[in-house]
Image: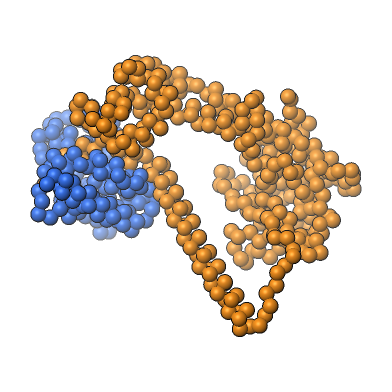
Chain colours: A orange, B blue
Amino acid sequence: MNGNDYILAFADIHDDLIRAASDDAAVCRAFRQYRARRNKTIGALCCCAVIAMVAVGFGLKNRFGKQPSVVSNEPAATDRLPTEPDGTELPDQPGVIPQEQTSSTVETPSSDDTEPFVPETETPTQDTPVPQDDDSVIWGDTHGTLPSAYVLWNGKQIDYYLWTVLQSDTSGKVIAIVASPAIDYQFVYDGKTIARYEAEAYEERLLPEKLQRLLKEGETLKYGEDLYTIGTPDGEKWAKSLYEEKIAYYGEELLSRYIVNGDFLSDRVAADIPPAEADTSAKDAYDKAIGAFYAQTVSSAASAISAAGLSCSVTERGALLFFASAERFVSLTAPEDAEWYYSLAEKDADGTVPTRECSDMRVSG
Amino acid sequence: MEVQPEVMNFLQTGQIIQKLRMDAELTQEQLADQLFVSRELVSKWELGQRRPNIRELREMASLFRVGIDDLIDTNGLWDELASCFPAGRQLSAARFSALLDPFLRTLSERERGVFIRRYYSLEDVSDISTAFDITNNHVRVILSRTRKKLKEYLKGAANERQ
């Protein structure tokens, strides 16, 4: 074998392998998944080692230290509203935050101070109107699209920027907070779950690419199972796993539309590509379903929070913007119908926050 | 600044392509048309900003009627692979070519990506590590493991033929 032989061999690598290797995003994703799996395994091994060491240490202590083991009757700690024995909430220590920043300056109220978004019978004693004076409101800096980690703090999932503010002295000020519900993929809109809408939108997005690929692979795929059993007339033979991978990718329904009686209908595939590229109906339906979910979830919370005396509005993205002091925020309890995420609100570049009145969020039907 | 041998070779390939193109009295656009690539890509080859892949080199060699080795010095690259061949057993070029595709399909997406970028796209280790957001060392480890796998695969194939 000389250099020329190597070159000729590598020049004949099948196109689909070259394309896959050139797809940086897909390969990077594979690396990320690999790293995540590896870290998880290492984490699990470390946990096992620590547990084993603690168990050994505990055993030795019991054997030689003459310290009786104590079994607590207290319920196990949960991730929502952990409390001291007297009912006082403990501030959660978010694991992703540097140690030197973890000293909390926000006083933690007793459980009696906790007020729900939905006040059951009581009328709030002190209303928080929409702040007019910007100096009295703490807004977030513009972080652009930088994602922020969420940490569990006093039973609430809050983002890092909000957490930072809550660790500082906020006396005399209110904080602009955005509350967003986690999407419930089992939420049913117009007879289908959001999970279903999402799957259909994903398929719709993939379809043009699938058709483009099918244009190139259809002439081979038309041989069906012969591809891995006896091979094609021109000698091409696939591994069964590759064949199954391809069938799973295209789906039997799609293939049966374009491979009929062993013939590949390439003209039909080519004709179907432009309409597939233009079709956004599934994406539109998904957006509508998400809109309905937000409308329903945020609407009930918005009404409740307004009734609780905190001024609020709904952002263009459908999240809930409200203003509360740190103490008031700590005492709020999210409605149980959704998991809520809180972040520090940011103004747009022009210094405004596009919102609409909460009353506009009523769900129809 | 010290020029890395691979970079130097990269630049040399561009200069060779430019010389051959001008000797053939072709514009960048005409060469691009003949190779079914864009004019911008030809320009990048000549400036040493991109390296033609194996297939493009093969087409170019055929067009200019030169050997591929005249276009690019890949000896070091193939030396890496030479150790994968089973000692004492002949494996023909045609057989290796036929085995390469099925071997690549046995690899994980990560291994395949790195291996193809190295030996088909002729990218150096640092380019691959940048493309896949991993360290140079990680790329070398993957290449080394993949070559070991290739060695085992070719060994199995050689035994199969006996």
Residue at x-position 24% and y-position 40%: B101
Along the viewing direction, whichever of B83 and A341 lies nearer the viewer = B83
Number of numbered markers: 0
Examine the rendered structure and indicate whether residue A214 appears above or below residue B141: above
Residue at x-position 65% and y-position 24%: A190
Q: In this view, does A314 lie to the left or right of A239?
A: right
The answer to whether residue B147 of the structure is visible from this angle is no
Residue at x-position 55% and y-position 27%: A283
Q: In this view, does A284 lie to the left or right of B1?
A: right
Where is residue A167, by image quadrant?
bottom right
Q: Is residue A297 left or right of residue A310?
A: left
Where is residue A165, by image quadrant?
bottom right
Indicate the position of residue A61 as horizontal and vertical percent values.
61, 79
Q: In this view, does A272 lie to the left or right of A298?
A: left
In which quadrant will I find the N terminus of chain B? bottom left
Residue at x-position 45% and y-position 21%: A276
Indicate the position of residue A71 as horizontal and vertical percent values.
70, 69
The answer to whether residue A44 of the structure is visible from this angle is yes
Examine the rendered structure and indicate whether residue A79 appears above or below residue A275: below
Indicate the position of residue A214 as horizontal and vertical percent values.
35, 26
Indicate the position of residue A236 as horizontal and vertical percent values.
22, 31
Give the farthest residue toward the front: A63
